[in-house]
């Protein structure tokens, strides 16, 4: 069977309502923002966000930007301090993304933040984006609507070419006016830092924040580049982590995968299964929440079963390996 081709629909009121319905069902919808087209998913659904990573074909779980219709909707999810409020007041809606401390108990998927205690948020200026988010009634996680490694799409045709059948719908509102991604500013640390230059000039931001720090390993775009700024510090459990286990040791908690558990699983302090049926997309959806839960289980260590490298399995294994051994470039500071 041929992969279905995503329907491109002019962004009428009816099409936006239909797209919002698809999003609430956990499907993916590509939509215009003022910067580039985004591939949107319900940010509160682990499963929808996992599908997003699968569609992007990203080799890693880079954290995603969560899009809101209104700055007032952000408070339950991210900590808006004085700096954030000043930037929001001046530049939102617009091509600015703020990385904030996650509000405890937020219903946003842990996978959106790649397990980190931060969340990237933005209020886009495009009327179609805002209407869609409002109609969906949930914030939307949305990376640029291209497969990893392709350039960012500024027309609906670019999206169709790069992602083919992945979105259930592509909302078309013509070329995006800004044409490059939003500027990403990290406000989770004491000093504001520029993580990604973009559609809003650094000087305009510095007029509000004062001089921005620029992390040495800043990332441009979302290719297979190194992680930007504080991303050097990936989420890792506090407990020691053992990979590809075939036999449980005393006092361990088990991160299982698939129907066949390893020897000694019965004596595990706690068992959580990423996907009892062996589905890597389901496993990705559960990964960070389960690591956090096992980390808090009172076990001596976490034992993780092998996950196959196919599809999202590669990104899962990448993240598990990083959780074992910190990256050489994981320096503190902002
Ligand atoms: O203009 C844009 O920002 C577009 C449109 C669709 O809104 N979106 C976009 O998303 O470019 P994406 O996923 O391609 O890029 C997100 C950037 C990446 O550089 C990512 O590392 C950074 O934001 N980011 C997201 N969450 C972060 C976090 N918690 N900490 C640090 N960086 C984060
Ligand atoms: Mg991108």
Image (cartoon, rainbow, N blue to C red):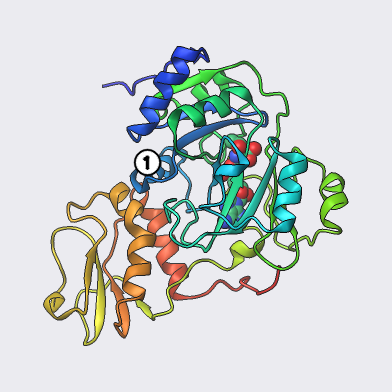
* Mark 1 neighbour density, 10 Å: few (under 14) some (14–19) many (20 or more): many
Outermost front residue: 72
Q: Quarter of the image containing the C terminus?
A: bottom right
The percent position of residue 268, horizontal first and vertical second, equals 19, 78
- The secondary structure type at the circle numbered 1 is helix
Front residue of this view, candidates 147 and 200: 200
Mark 1 highlights which residue?
Answer: 48
- Residue 273 visible within the image: yes
Residue 226 visible? The answer is no
Q: Residue at the location (73% across, 62% down)?
A: 215
Residue at (45% x, 71% y) in the render: 323
Task: Tell me where residue 98 appears, x and y as whole percent.
Answer: 66, 50
- Which residue: 41% across, 46% down? 44
The answer to which of 283 and 329 lies nearer the viewer is 283
Q: In this image, 73 relative to 111: left or right? A: right
**Quadrant in which the N terminus is drawn:** top left
Q: Quadrant of residue 250?
A: bottom left
Front residue of this view, candidates 325 and 101: 101
Image point 65% across, 45% down: which residue? 221
As drawn, is 87 to the left or to the right of 322?
A: right
Would you place residue 219 above or below residue 13 in this image? below
Instruction: Name the spot of residue 94 as percent of width and height, x first.
Output: 70, 35
Instruction: From this view, report whether residue 277 is shown above or below residue 320.
Output: above
Disc 1 CB within 8 Å of nearest ligand 1 atom: no
Foreground of the two, 285 or 165: 285
Q: Position of residue 205 (x, y in %)?
A: 81, 48
């Amino acid at each position: 069977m041929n992969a279905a081709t995503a329907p491109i629909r002019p962004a009428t009121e009816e099409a936006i309502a239909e797209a919002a319905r698809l999003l609430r069902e956990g499907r993916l919808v590509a939509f215009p923002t003022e910067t580039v087209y985004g591939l949107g998913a319900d940010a509160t659904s682990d499963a929808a966000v996992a599908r997003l990573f699968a569609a992007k074909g990203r080799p890693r779980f880079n954290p995603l930007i969560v899009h809101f219709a209104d700055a007032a909707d952000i408070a339950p999810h991210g900590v808006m301090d004085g700096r954030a409020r000043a930037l929001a007041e001046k530049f939102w809606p617009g091509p600015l993304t703020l990385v904030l401390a996650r509000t405890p108990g937020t219903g946003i998927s842990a996978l959106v933040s790649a397990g980190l205690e931060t969340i990237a948020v933005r209020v886009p200026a495009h009327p179609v984006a805002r209407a869609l988010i409002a109609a969906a009634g949930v914030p939307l996680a949305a990376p640029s609507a291209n497969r990893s490694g392709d350039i960012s799409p500024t027309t609906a045709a670019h999206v169709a070419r790069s992602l083919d059948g992945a979105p259930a719908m592509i909302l078309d509102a013509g070329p995006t006016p800004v044409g490059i991604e939003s500027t990403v500013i990290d406000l989770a640390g004491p000093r504001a830092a520029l993580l990604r230059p973009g559609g809003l000039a650094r000087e305009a931001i510095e007029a509000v924040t004062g001089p921005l720090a620029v992390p040495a390993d800043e990332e441009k775009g979302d290719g297979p580049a190194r992680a930007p700024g504080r991303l050097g510090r990936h989420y890792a459990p506090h407990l020691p982590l053992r990979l590809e286990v075939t036999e449980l040791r005393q006092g361990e908690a088990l991160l299982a995968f698939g129907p066949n558990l390893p020897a000694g699983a019965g004596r595990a302090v706690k068992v959580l299964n990423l996907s009892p049926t062996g589905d890597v997309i389901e496993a990705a959806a559960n990964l960070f929440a389960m690591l956090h839960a096992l980390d808090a289980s009172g076990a001596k260590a976490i034992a993780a079963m092998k996950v196959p490298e196919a599809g999202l399995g590669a990104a899962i294994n990448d993240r598990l390996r990083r959780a074992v051994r910190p990256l050489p470039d994981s320096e503190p500071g902002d």
